[in-house]
Image (cartoon, coloured by chain):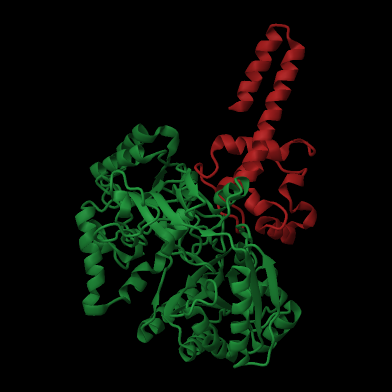
Amino acid sequence: MTGSRNWKLQWICAALGLVGYAAQAAGDSQDVLISRGKAAFTHRCAMCHREGQTGTFILARRLGKEKSLLEQRPDLQPAYVRQVVRAGLVNMPRLSRVEMPDTDLDAVIAYLVSPKGSP
Amino acid sequence: MKLILPPGVSAARFAEALTAFAGVVGKQWVLATDEDRDTYIDAYAPGEEASHAPSAAVAPADVAQIQGILKVANQFNIPLWPISRGKNFGYGGASPRLPGTVILDLGRMDRIIEVNEAQGYCIVEPGVGFFDMYDHLQKNKIALQLGTPGNGWGSVMGNALERGFSPAGDHSNNICGLEIVLANGEIVRTGMGAMGNGKAWPLFKHGFGPSWDQMIVQSNFAIVTKMCLWMKPEDEAAITIDIKLDKPGELEWFTQAATPLRLKGVLDGLVRLTSYQSSATVPTLRSEWYTGPGSIPDDVIEKMKTRLNVGWWNGTVRLAGYSEVCEANLKIVQAQFAKFTRQEFPVKRTPGSLRAGPSTYPLQMTNWYGGRGGHIGFSPAMPADARLVQQQFERTRRRYQEFGLDYSGTFYNDGRSVTNVNLILYGRDDPDMKRRVRQLFMALVADAKQLGYGEYRTHLSYMDDVAASFDFNNHALRTLNERVKDALDPNGVLAPGRNGIWPVAYRDRRGKL
């Protein structure tokens, strides 16, 4: 949904000849989305998926330490993250749309798949 | 999960009910796809997932929407299963007892309404988790502490309503006033909150007349929308004594030594002693130790103890409060232990409270067998009698061995009673193991019943079995509970079957999975 809004904003700006502004606006929106994703990750995921927590530990056991911290993974794909959150994986429970609303999930995905070093 | 309709409700009627729910909460908060249903299935189900499959979930934002949902539920005869955050792992998670029940997900109601440092309490809504409360205390520099269970992912309120506990004790003992919504939509406040302008609602437990707080705990008489909960002020100092006992038979002397210390209030919180295995289940896999049939044998246990540097029994004795009092109590504890052993136990002094943030770290134990795992607990309450405790351990361990499962037991001593939490781990993709888990569990229920020990809490699939063991005067308490249930909830829309309490509309479902 947010992606769709970005596209519309870019299109309108482009139509008005505001190419530079469109790029800036899209960048800002993406930054905001990623920033919101980081906050949502902290609130909804970090209890298991940061250093020293259970998800990190089990991922290290299964995939190796280099792939155990989700926020440092360069290989996560949106569809895969969505699938794991909603369907669970091994011993990770599934998260409902109350626990993780779709809008938060969109933001978390944007954060996790963003180039590393993003805010 | 494909749709399983509520009993006696047609597909068309169910669809009408969902539309009516959407009229109350908005379409986006009626969750009824196959994927939605899956997200409410018990993540660690010890049996068939379909045994406790919900038909949908509906998520209100406030009390008025709960009232609207109840109106629809009564009109269409839709059973509802209220959950706070649905993290009741080991006991059924977010799943309902009766297949086809609609989950009433209260997770959106997540306000910390008040935290009062001076008087030591908080008032919370169902969706407030332990992490939320911890962050709130840290951010606002509030000098209060809250007992946190092993799985800190869950709801502060939901845990107390289940009689969850931590070393701090039984969390339901800290409840001091509730706001509840009855099945007919009526809002009631308990205790001093029953006064329109009651100033002592979170301060004085009982109000005037019968006390309803504990009637609501582990029941299905009402939906709780606000809870007042006492919190302990920060301590000036804490002392911990690390207990490591080498032999399984040492549980007896330790229980004998610790019981009077807890009874007389020398020790802070429950005295916990847990078997070697809990030190292994989190950081290691079973296959690292043993791949043969049956329970892990004694020679392997000795290897585990050596490599993990743990005893057969391990625990922590805690002293907390004013520094001088802790030091004085430490001398009392050490003198008491010296009557039973020459072993000296390491003492650690900590300025301030023994404050550890909530964690999900222990959930790793579900990985013990590798692959998709799960856990349930069999946890009878029994007298704090050293000989009986030792016998309880030996008998229970023999049962684990009989069914070829790994023993993992913890004894929580509260001075008068001991709660014996027996953890049963299993692989969810091993049908033979799941069958043996059920056999073990039923054997433990029967043993405990014969001895007069009853479980304090259990998984959905065993609620009827455990409730049946409370059988004085031909199950008079169950009859009383169900008389109250029928009076308060004549259509049986609230959590049918919870803790073995069945409304008349579904009473024929007792014992059926």
Residue B6 seen anywhere in this rendered image of the structure:
no
Residue B143 image point, x, y percent: 58, 54
User: Is A2 on the left-hand or right-hand side of B212?
Assistant: right
**Foreground residue, B409 or B318?**
B318
Figure quadrant of residue B338: bottom right
Residue B291 image point, x, y percent: 67, 78
**Foreground residue, B320 or B302?**
B320
Apparent colour of chain A:
red
* Number of numbered discs on residues: 0
Apparent colour of chain B:
green
User: Is B2 on the left-hand or right-hand side of B375?
Assistant: left
Q: Residue at x 72, y 15 (%)?
A: A22
**Foreground residue, A62 or B447?**
B447
Residue B23 seen anywhere in this rendered image of the structure:
yes
**Foreground residue, B199 or B367?**
B199
Residue B341 image point, x, y percent: 64, 92
Q: Is residue A75 above or below residue B503?
A: above
Figure quadrant of residue B298: bottom right
Q: Is residue B377 above or below residue B252?
A: above
Residue A49 image point, x, y percent: 67, 51
Q: Residue at x 56, y 46 (%)?
A: A86
User: Is B290 on the left-hand or right-hand side of B363?
Assistant: right
Q: Is residue B83 above or below residue B19?
A: below
In the picture, which quadrant includes the C terminus of chain B?
A: bottom left
The residue at the far front in this view is B324
Figure quadrant of residue B257: bottom right
